[in-house]
Amino acid sequence: MAKEFIVTPWNVSGDVDYKRLINEFGIKEIDGPLLKRIKKITGELHPFLRRNIFFAHRDLNWILDEYEKGNKFFLYTGRAPSGHTHLGHLVPWIFTKWIQEKFNVNLWFQFPDEEKFLFKENLTLKDTEKYTYENMLDVIAVGFDPKKTKFLIDTKNANLMYKEALKVAKKINFSNVKAAFGLNNESNIGIIFYTAMQAVPAFLPSVLAKKNIPCLIPHAVDQDPHFRLSRDVVGKLGYYKPASIQCRFLPALQGSSGKMSASMEKTAIYTVDNEKIVAKKINKYAFSGGRDTIEEHRRLGGIPEKDIAYQWLNFFEEDDKKLVKIYHDYKSGKLLSGELKAILIDKINNMLKKHQKNREKAKKQLDKFIIKG
Ligand code: TRP
């Protein structure tokens, strides 16, 4: 019997079977020919593409067709503030930055500061306001071009967004939303409306420019239900249906291929964590694919496929050669579990050191990203 798992924008649990997800969601695999096509334009492939971390899409070939005709797309992605940013959140942003650079395109980044307020019992609007600020610093720290990037904050930019959201909402009925998100009659009515707000940035730039511009949405695969619903609606409103490129989840430190949830407070690694905390979390919680004793480990070797430190290096160690060597050393028993964790700790701390520096500088750059009025 197939193992059970759940993937919706608000609940990811169980062992995610990505092959099955492709069928259930009706998305397309990113295959060899498509990778080749991207490489022709970008010159090289980002490790997230080489390693199949970005693994699925909708209409990506169409986006490339238009791009090659000179019809540039804009990027759209987002983050619903509910807590500090963790490493899993960075994955689609790092990739989005790469696309922005390689294709030289604009990005609209949405901060739906009402979303998690509506979904989480104990989260106040004051909390989400605070985390909107904190999360914006992280997004800026990733290195987006301030001249080509705009932040849309739902409660602050409601004047731009609300009219457009109404047009979307009018074309989606309750049973569609219920089915797509697994809602029931006890779900609050804000939740039912919310997906209309998430649809807006996919065509708002076209509204403002008074011309149709293709849209590409990089996102983690759990967000697909939103766009599955809104693609048709956006089309019916007379705009291009947004295309998407979708990634897997960074696994939780404790293992399981579910999403690393910000609510797993103790074990997620946040961009604001210091070196000691990073080392402690990885040493204490990272699920090991090593053996029970050193003797056994040397004899049988570790299991990289099960080892979270290795899995994380697969996301964050960009050097293929280094990664392959780590894989073989671990599998052969030459590299011990503690040593593997030490490599990861070093990698993450280096990454965060740079990120935290950028994050400090970001405080002075906010103005360049936020839409006034
Ligand atoms: N719903 C997303 C979250 O929970 C936030 C978001 C808004 C988003 N618009 C998006 C994510 C577009 C990806 C793409 O964080």
Image (cartoon, rainbow, N blue to C red):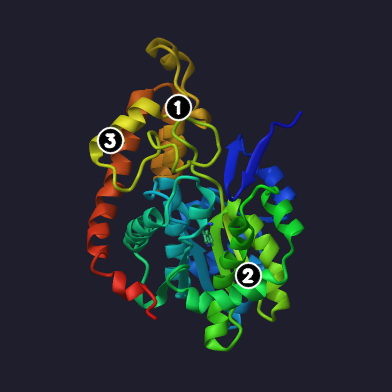
Q: Which of marks 1 and 3 is nearer the N terminus?
A: 3
Name the foreground residue: 140 vs 169.
Answer: 169
Kind of residue at badge 1: Phe
Question: Of the residues under marks 2 and 1, which one precedes in the sequence?
Answer: 2
Q: Which amino acid does label 3 sit on?
A: Ile
**Residue receiving disc 3:** 277
Q: Residue at image x 25%, y 64%?
A: 363
Alpha carbon separation for disc pair 2 and 1: 38 Å
- The Cα–Cα distance between marks 2 and 3, rounded to whole angstroms, is 40 Å
Residue, x 69% and y 62% (percent of image)? 229
Which residue was labeled with disc 1?
A: 287
Q: What element carries label 1?
A: loop
- Asked whether 81 or 211 is in front, the reply is 81
Does residue 72 show up? no
Q: Residue 227's spot in the image, x, y percent?
A: 64, 62
Assign the C terminus to one quadrant of the image: bottom left
The residue shown at (67%, 66%) is 230
Relative to 280, 224 lies left or right: right
Percent coordinates x, y for residue 311 in the rendering: 47, 37
Q: What residue type is labelled 2?
A: Pro
- Looking at the rendering, in which quadrant would you find the N terminus? top right
Asked whether the beta carbons under mark 2 and mark 3 sit within 8 Å of each other, the answer is no
The tag on residue 310 is none
